[in-house]
Amino acid sequence: MITFVPTPIGNLGDITLRAIETLREADLIACEDTRHSLKLLSHLEISKPLTSLHDHNEATKGPELIKRAKEGEKIAIISDAGTPCLSDPGHRLLKAARDQDIEFTVLPGPSAITTALVASGFPPHPFSFHGFLHVKKGKRSKQLQAALDSAETTLFFESPHRIPSTLEILNDLSPETLICVARELTKKFETLHHGTCSELNTHFQTHKAKGEIVLLIPPAKS
């Protein structure tokens, strides 16, 4: 059995009882960053063998985990925060497990995507999530223009050091469009910044952003 286990996106109290039980019963826990995951596991007083599973080794580590699952081991998959596979490692392993008829399950739990979507106050459906915005400004601009033109609420992850540049692009494209920047969700300094592209561009040019960020753009007005 391979179990994909969501972990808290900030507040450690958000982990589910089922997730804790799964981690306690696992023979091996595969982590995006073992050092980061040790903090959570120590908090839960769980001591299990750990192995790394991240974007750079998933293709090679996957077959090893599949083999161990075939031999009867219980494998738990966790990322640094939130649900594995959603802009986090795990998708290739899950697909391999499905293709090879290895039993697997995905637990429900914390996700910055759904938390930000509901908290933003924008229409929750339909919506689309596009992971991290592109590093290159030209491609990022095309992604943002497509979101501004979309009939759906659109969500992106963005890094704190790039959010000023991204908001500058949005200000150039559509200064009066209302958007939301959700930051540090579930944590002590959680903030939901609502305003026009122009207003938030001005704010973040002078206020350094920190922590995890979700950028939300509402549906285009018909």
Image (spheres, rainbow, N blue to C red):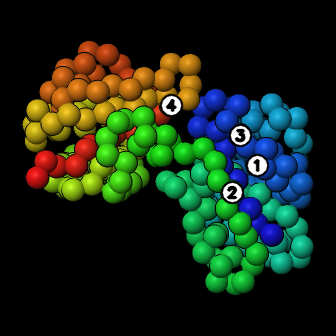
| SS under mark 4 | loop
**Which residue is the site of mark 3?**
15
Residue 117 shown left or right of residue 94 in the figure? left
Disc 3/disc 4 C-alpha distance (Å): 14 Å
**Which residue is the site of mark 4?**
185
Q: Residue at x 26, y 43 (%)?
A: 217
Residue 133 in sight: no
10 Å crowding of disc 2: few (<14), some (14-19), many (20+): some
Disc 2/disc 1 C-alpha distance (Å): 7 Å
Residue type, numbered disc 4:
Leu
Residue type, numbered disc 1:
Ala
Q: Earlier in the sequence, mark 2 or mark 3?
A: 3
Q: Earlier in the sequence, mark 2 or mark 4?
A: 2
- Where is residue 35, by image quadrant? top right
* Residue 172 vertical position relative to residue 154 in the rendered view, above or below: above
Q: Residue at x 80, y 62 (%)?
A: 75
Q: Are marks 3 and 1 in contact (CB under 8 Å)?
A: yes
Q: Quadrant of the N terminus?
A: bottom right
Q: Residue at x 37, y 48 (%)?
A: 124
**Which residue is the site of mark 1?**
19
Residue 196 shown left or right of residue 163 in the figure? left
Q: Are marks 2 and 1 in contact (CB under 8 Å)?
A: yes
List x then y, in percent, for residue 4.
Answer: 69, 59
Disc 2/disc 4 C-alpha distance (Å): 20 Å
Residue type, numbered disc 2:
Leu
Q: Are marks 3 and 4 in contact (CB under 8 Å)?
A: no
Taking the view exactly as shown, the residue that stands out farthest to the bottom is 100
Q: Which mark is residue 107?
A: 2
- Where is residue 195, by image quadrant? top left
Residue type, numbered disc 3:
Ile
List x then y, in percent, for residue 167.
Answer: 23, 33
